[in-house]
Amino acid sequence: MDKADDGRPDALGRYGKLCVVDDTQISDDLTRVLFTTEQIAGRMIELAAEIDRDYAGKDLLLVGVLNGAVMVMADLSRALTMHCKMDWMAVTSYGSGTQSSGVVRILKDLSTDITGVHVLVVEDIIDTGLTLSYLVSNLLSRGPASLKIMTAFRKPEAEQNAVEVAYVGFDIPNEFVVGYGLDYDGRYRNLTSVGALSPHVYS
Ligand code: IMP
């Protein structure tokens, strides 16, 4: 990525040429790049505009699902023109492999009471939708004023899931992807673009 090192941050808040992990640095680990840094940033801005419109005049709580949604949350929330609050949950559904275990465990719960609150869950990716189904029923049992879902990426299998997703960044093929918060075995989260992980990395 060609970025001038003039000591000032660019539109994405990045400083300098050398502090960005882009796909050119890990091209051997990827089969291809699905979305560039700029495409993702543009889509987050579009979704934020929709959310601004839909929640006008309401108090909004964004609930980020750790760890993957950190980047989405940071970009989406800063693209909103309305005020919002943020809280976080940490759940686990995958071990260190690339297949869903189907088992969801809460590692960190919300710090706030969401009774009567307009909640928008901010997800990184929906694959089978198992994690999301669990989260939705768990959060609905707490009596929010409304509950909607936003996800940066969605795989085809999620369509079969009964949970409605209000805001989708990108529908993607059924491949294991990394970057923009998405990891494989804890790595690649700080890759600024999103790419399909090469099988040689996990086989
Ligand atoms: P689901 O329960 O199958 O929808 O899986 C959701 C969770 O699995 C996400 O929040 C991610 O942590 C992880 N996940 C699913 N697909 C991918 C992927 O392609 N790359 C990285 N993580 C993934």
Image (cartoon, rainbow, N blue to C red):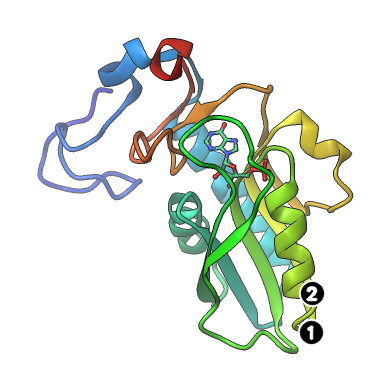
Name the amino acid type tagged 1.
Gly
Label 1 sits on residue: 143
Image quadrant in which you'd find residue 121? bottom right
Q: Is mark 1 within 8 Å of ligand 1?
A: no
Asked if disc 2 and disc 1 are in contact, CB closer than 8 Å, the reply is yes
Image quadrant in which you'd find residue 158? top right
Instruction: Judge from the rendering whether residue 31 lies leftward or rightward of residue 172; answer left or right.
Output: left
Say which mark, if any, is on residue 140. 2
Instruction: Judge from the rendering whether residue 27 lies leftward or rightward of residue 162; answer left or right.
Output: left
Say which mark, if any, is on residue 170. none
Image quadrant in which you'd find residue 65? bottom right
Task: Give the camera-side residue of 178 and 171.
Answer: 178
Image coordinates for residue 150, horizontal then vertical, percent: 67, 54
The residue lying at 61 percent from left, 21 percent from top is 175
Up/down of 9 relative to 61, above or below: above
Image coordinates for residue 122, horizontal then vertical, percent: 60, 58
Please rate how many residues cluster around mark 2, counting C-alpha atoms within 10 Å: few if below 14, some from 14 to 19, many from 20: some
- Quadrant position of the C terminus in the picture: top left
Distance Cα–Cα, label 2 vs label 1: 6 Å
Image coordinates for residue 89, horizontal then vertical, percent: 54, 67
